[in-house]
Amino acid sequence: MSWISALAELQQSGTPCVLVTIIEERGSTPRNAGSKMVVSAERIYQTIGGGHLEYKAMQIAREMLESRTQDSRLERFSLGASLGQCCGGATVLLFEPMGQPQAHIAVFGAGHVGRALIPILASLPCKVRWIDSRESEFPAQIADNVEKVVSEDVVDEVEAMPSGSYYIVMTHNHQLDLELTAAILKREDFAYYGLIGSQTKRVKFEHRLRDRGFSADVMQRMRCPLGLAEVKGKLPVEIAVSIAGEVIATYNSTFGEHKNSKSGKGESIAKLMPTSRRSQG
């Protein structure tokens, strides 16, 4: 795959990467100026010559991805014994971060809070799937990075999300909320799960989930009530801001971790957050 095709593919999937370009060459070097390599957290595309130079470039690029920097960077390398290469020349590499890390978020429910929350999430570096069985509940205009999903079988949409996704459940039906909760907790690979409702609703759900065989450790990862307690108010937009704040806090805490881990990182994140008083729904 060419470097430009790789960039397009990564942009389409919302995967951040670093474009590495040789911008200066002196003496003998493995590749000429203008040669490029694309580095993501999982793969590299094309080459700037291989060897230890390429390894160091890949290492720097992934450190930039880990730190989420958006600043370009220049590095000069002497291709001698210290770098483990015998070319004897020198090269200057330009590192350019491309794209923003994107969270994948599924929002179930197009009620008042959902309609207030979606515009906030759409302004963040994320991809949103907004799911409801009621076509009439969706507004006429929806942001480009929000996918509207009208489905009679909304529970099936849980499996359509990639590993490490964020789930927010606020439907009009408590039984549907319970079925969605069971499907999400069963996956165990979510980065965040928030359920709108009161502490009483949580207790009832936990009782029913225990009857289905869910452990206390898994249920602890569910945020219900959801949202940041510091953000007060009961207006839909106030609740939406509180939920978005909690999602952002979780996103910043887990960036760079392996989202498909089942080690219970979501539980430790939840412990860092104060208990919410969001009890609507």
Image (cartoon, rainbow, N blue to C red):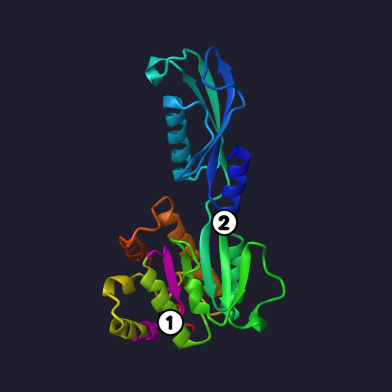
Q: Which mark is residue 280?
A: none
Q: Quadrant of the N terminus?
A: top right
- Residue 137 locus on image (x, y percent): 64, 82
Residue 143 in the figure: left or right of residue 248: right
Q: Can residue 224 be seen in this view?
A: no
Q: Residues within 10 Å of mark 2 (few under 14, many from 20)?
A: some
- Residue 122 locus on image (x, y percent): 61, 63
In the orientation shown, which residue stands out farthest toward the right?
140
User: Which residue position holds label 1?
Assistant: 179
Closer to us: 165 or 12: 12
- Residue 221 locus on image (x, y percent): 35, 69
Q: Residue at x 72, y 75 (%)?
A: 140
In the orientation shown, which residue stands out farthest toward the front?
1
Of badges 1 and 2, nearer the viewer stands 1
Span highlighted in magenta in the image: 189-204
Q: Which mark is residue 125?
A: 2
Q: Mark 2 is on which residue type?
A: Pro
Closer to us: 57 or 8: 8
Marked residue nearer the N-terminal end (1 or 2): 2
Q: How far apart are marks 1 and 2 (CA)?
A: 29 Å
Q: Residue at x 39, y 58 (%)?
A: 260
Q: How crowded is mark 1: few (under 14 residues within 10 Å), some or many (20 or more)?
A: few
- Residue 125 locus on image (x, y percent): 57, 56
- Position of 40 relative to 221 (above/below): above
| Circle 1: element type | helix
Q: Mark 1 is on which residue type?
A: Glu
Q: Which residue is drawn at 30% across and 77% down?
A: 214
- Position of 91 relative to 105 (above/below): above
| Circle 2: element type | loop
